[in-house]
């Protein structure tokens, strides 16, 4: 037996008391039936937007989608929806609709209001998203509950027509499969395969938003292979699609997978939940097809593939319309992913690495490396990587630049009794070099003492 949260019951009651029909619908009803956590309830009603606005003070109208939003207090608060400042959730109430005419495969040319709930459920994408619930009865004309039980994504109505109306639904199908661990039913999958190329009519931003949700879903790695098999990957990451044809198995090399399979496996094992880090892990080796060389003995090499890969990362960032910050992160992670964790490296080599990647991105590039290792067939964590992490922390305790020293130019001027001039920089540089080499502590007294000694040395 399922039940609605009090706040959702209240919304439905307000509409019903005013003489309208009202149901919770869509993702939240689906999640409720699955016993999963949910957010942002959606409602459907025969009240018009104006009638809804009149019933809920502080509601607002989004005329692009014909939806009225109402602000809801934090979960656990049992009072009625209101317009208080400290609100958390937005619930959306949409008037029954029946949509027709999708010239651009994405937006209905016109929103047509529907008269009945059945009509409204008919225009929804998948059976599992087309179940309505008013707190008492479930209205499920398309067998959504059966598909939930059998873990199946199936369109409402004829699949090829539904994807022709709206190509984004193809990615939504894969996204729900990735999140719920469901399979896409045969007719639905066939229709996606034959409509895959219409993804080109969808804006890059919308593709990116869906793709990011897929990358962070529980079954993300399987979903990438589903995208490939359905012919969608070609329109999202063509460089990844073609990398499945680049082998890596060769004498003296540990690789067991082709580049594409390794990429997917690496992303699967990447412990980060950040979509950009997961994307970076997925594309980190895409410079390999371009730099592939095989000698007479059969040995395969990919020299400088991280440089070629970084260019590809830039292209991908641009194509998916990432923000400048996201794009820079994607580029940096791919560019420097080949870092060595050799324990014989000097501190200054580690510091150079930190400077290139940026302190704040160290956890991200380490997450990429963990995915890269485990996705390459390694079974345990490497003691070298663990040691390297420890050393990264240690060297960060040391100053990175002259400005991190616990003395400054004023100290030099005072001690040397001099005015601003080149000598000040020289003294500070000399101190910094000794601190960096580990022969001097970054401690104020020690630095001042050494400064004094340098003065005497200079005098002689
Ligand atoms: P999520 O958990 O990601 O919010 P959701 O199922 O609630 O999943 P929304 O995008 O919030 O997805 O949409 C709410 C509901 O609106 C869906 O469950 C579905 O019934 C309907 N819907 C959304 N997008 C489409 C679409 N492109 N075509 C048809 N119906 C759609
Ligand atoms: Mg939703």
Image (spheres, rainbow, N blue to C red):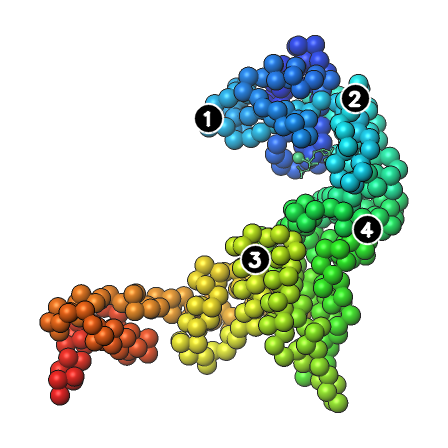
Give me the C-alpha separation between circle 2 and circle 3. Answer: 43 Å
Residue 315 point in image, percent of width and height:
64, 61
Q: Earlier in the sequence, mark 3 or mark 1?
A: 1
Give the alpha-carbon distance from disc 4 to disc 3, as whole Å.
26 Å
Instruction: Say which element carries label 2.
Output: loop
- Distance from mark 1 CB to nearest ligand 2 atom below 8 Å: no
- Quarter of the picture containing the C terminus is bottom left
Asked if marks 3 and 1 touch (Cβ < 8 Å), the reply is no
Residue in view at x 88 percent, y 44 percent: 187
Q: Are marks 4 and 3 in contact (CB under 8 Å)?
A: no
Q: Is residue 409 above or below residue 95?
A: below
Q: Is residue 110 above or below residue 325?
A: above
Residue bearing mark 3: 327
Query: Rounded to the nearest whole Å, what is the CA distance between mark 4 and mark 2?
Result: 30 Å
Image depth: mark 1 or mark 2 in front: 2
The residue that mark 4 highlights is: 196
Q: Are marks 1 and 4 in contact (CB under 8 Å)?
A: no
Q: Residues within 10 Å of mark 3 (few under 14, many from 20)?
A: many
The quarter holding residue 302 reads bottom right
Task: Mark 2 and mark 3 in contact? Answer it, CB < 8 Å.
Answer: no
Whichever of labels 4 and 3 marks the residue nearer the N terminus, that label is 4
Q: Which mark is residue 85?
A: 1
Lower position in the chain sequence, tag 1 or tag 4: 1
Residue occupying the point 56% across, 52% down:
323
Mark 4 vs mark 2: which is more N-terminal?
2
The answer to whether 295 is drawn above or below residue 79 in the figure is below
Quadrant holding the N terminus:
top right
């Amino acid at each position: 037996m399922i039940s609605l949260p009090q706040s959702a019951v209240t919304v439905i009651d307000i509409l019903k008391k005013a003489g309208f029909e009202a149901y919770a619908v869509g993702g939240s009803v689906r999640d409720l039936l699955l016993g999963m956590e949910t957010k942002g309830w959606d409602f459907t009603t025969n009240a018009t937007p104006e009638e809804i606005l009149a019933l809920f003070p502080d509601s607002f109208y989004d005329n692009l989608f014909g939806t009225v939003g109402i602000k809801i207090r934090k979960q656990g608060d049992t009072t009625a929806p209101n317009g208080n400042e400290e609100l958390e959730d937005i619930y959306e109430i949409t008037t029954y609709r029946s949509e027709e005419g999708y010239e651009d495969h994405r937006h209905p040319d016109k929103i047509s209001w529907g008269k009945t709930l059945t009509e409204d459920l008919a225009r929804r994408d998948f059976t599992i998203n087309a179940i309505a619930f008013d707190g008492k009865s479930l209205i499920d004309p398309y067998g959504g509950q059966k598909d939930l039980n059998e873990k199946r994504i199936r369109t409402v109505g004829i699949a090829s027509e539904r994807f022709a109306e709206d190509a984004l639904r193809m990615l939504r199908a894969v996204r729900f499969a990735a999140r719920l661990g469901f399979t896409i039913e045969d007719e639905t999958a066939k229709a996606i395969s034959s409509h895959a190329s219409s993804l080109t009519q969808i804006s890059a931003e919308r593709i990116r938003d869906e793709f990011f949700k897929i990358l962070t879903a529980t079954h993300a790695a399987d979903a990438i292979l589903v995208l490939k098999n359905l012919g969608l990957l070609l329109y999202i990451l063509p460089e990844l699609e073609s990398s499945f044809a680049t082998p890596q198995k060769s004498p003296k090399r540990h690789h067991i997978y082709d580049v594409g399979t390794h990429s997917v496996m690496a992303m699967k094992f990447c412990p980060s939940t950040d979509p950009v880090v997961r994307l970076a892990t997925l594309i980190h080796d895409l410079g390999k097809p371009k730099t592939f060389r095989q000698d007479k003995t059969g040995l395969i090499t990919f020299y400088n593939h991280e440089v070629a890969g970084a260019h590809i990362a830039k292209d991908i960032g641009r194509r998916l319309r990432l923000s400048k910050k996201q794009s820079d992160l994607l580029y940096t992670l791919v560019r420097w992913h080949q870092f060595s964790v050799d324990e014989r490296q000097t501190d200054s080599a580690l510091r150079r690495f930190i400077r290139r990647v940026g302190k704040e991105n160290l956890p991200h590039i380490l997450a990429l490396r963990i995915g890269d290792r485990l996705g390459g067939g390694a079974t345990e964590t490497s003691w070298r990587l663990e040691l390297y992490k420890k050393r990264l922390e240690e060297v960060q305790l040391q100053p990175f630049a002259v400005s991190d020293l616990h003395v400054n130019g004023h100290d030099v001027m005072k001690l040397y009794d001099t005015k601003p001039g080149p000598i000040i920089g020289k003294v500070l540089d000399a101190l910094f070099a000794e601190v960096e080499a580990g022969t001097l502590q970054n401690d104020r007294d020690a630095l001042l003492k050494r400064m004094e000694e340098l003065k005497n040395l200079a005098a002689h």
